[in-house]
Image (cartoon, rainbow, N blue to C red):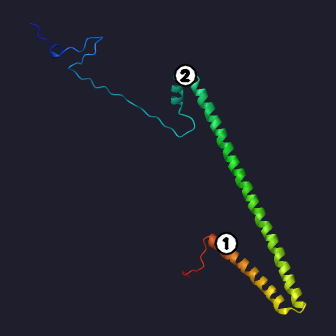
């Protein structure tokens, strides 16, 4: 006699699923799995296989992606150029401001020294000496103070080296 195989016996013992066209629940529960893949890249263009896959979706996609990348690169170059140009102009304005300040300080110092000498020679020794002396002391302090501030900005210390 022909005995049914184990597969046939299992198939015959299972209850039938819903009939086509009906929404009646089945005694069986089906579990489905979906696979999701996320691709990410840091380059301006996707890898060639991804670009090729875009082309399979729509033939114009690869060309549009290339055009978008070229526009983005042109924008980035333009932005960097504008930033560098703005920094250059700012630096030039700062240099002009500092130069103008030095010229004006020089003219003021010469004027005060001349006034001090003129007043001293004109018989006003106390006033002339005071103007002359304070001008010289201020100039020395400005030059030495500028050197000290510059050296502190460069990371130098006021304390002498103790390693020696």
Tag 1 and tag 2, C-beta contact below 8 Å: no
Q: Is residue 14 above or below residue 154?
A: above
Q: Is residue 76 above or below residue 37?
A: below
Quarter of the picture holding the C terminus: bottom right
Q: Measured from the top left, where is residue 74 in percent x and y?
A: 67, 39
**Side (left or right) of 72 relative to 98:** left
Total numbered circles? 2
Decide which of tag 1 and tag 2 comes sooner along the chain: 2
Residue sitting at 59 percent across and 76 percent down?
A: 157
Q: Which mark is residue 150?
A: 1
Q: Position of residue 14 (x, y in %)?
A: 17, 16
Label 1 sits on a secondary structure element that is: helix
**Which residue lies at the image location 21% right of the left edge and 14% below the top edge?**
16
Q: Secondary structure at mark 2?
A: loop
Q: Residue furthest top?
A: 1
Residue nearest the viewer, comparing 60 with 25: 25
Neighbours of disc 1 within 10 Å: few (<14), some (14-19), many (20+) = few
Estimate the spatial distance between the alpha carbons at disc 1 and disc 2, rounded to whole Å: 63 Å
Task: Locate residue 10 relative to residue 109 in the image: left or right.
Answer: left
* Nearer to us in this view, 150 or 117: 117
Place residue 35 in its image quadrant.
top left
Q: Nearer the viewer, residue 119 or 62?
A: 119
Q: Which residue lies most toward the left here?
A: 1
- Residue 38 coordinates in the image, percent (x, y): 44, 34
Quarter in which the N terminus is drawn: top left
Q: Which residue is mark 2?
A: 58
- Mark carried by residue 96: none
Q: Position of residue 67 (x, y in %)?
A: 63, 31
Q: Is residue 113 rendered to the left or right of residue 1?
A: right
């Amino acid at each position: 006699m022909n005995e049914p195989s184990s597969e046939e016996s299992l198939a015959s013992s299972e209850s039938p699923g819903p009939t086509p066209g009906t929404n009646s629940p089945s005694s069986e529960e089906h579990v489905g799995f979906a696979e999701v893949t996320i691709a990410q890249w840091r380059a301006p263009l996707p890898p060639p296989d991804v670009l090729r896959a875009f082309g399979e979706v729509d033939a114009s996609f690869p060309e549009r992606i290339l055009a978008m990348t070229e526009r983005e690169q042109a924008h980035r170059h333009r932005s960097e150029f504008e930033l560098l140009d703005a920094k250059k102009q700012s630096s030039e304005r700062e240099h002009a401001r500092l130069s103008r300040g030095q010229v004006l300080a020089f003219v003021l110092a010469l004027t005060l020294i001349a006034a001090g000498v003129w007043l001293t020679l004109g018989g006003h020794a106390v006033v002339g000496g005071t103007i002359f002396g304070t001008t010289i002391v201020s100039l020395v302090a400005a030059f030495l103070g500028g050197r000290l501030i510059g050296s502190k900005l460069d990371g130098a210390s006021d304390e002498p080296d103790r390693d020696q």
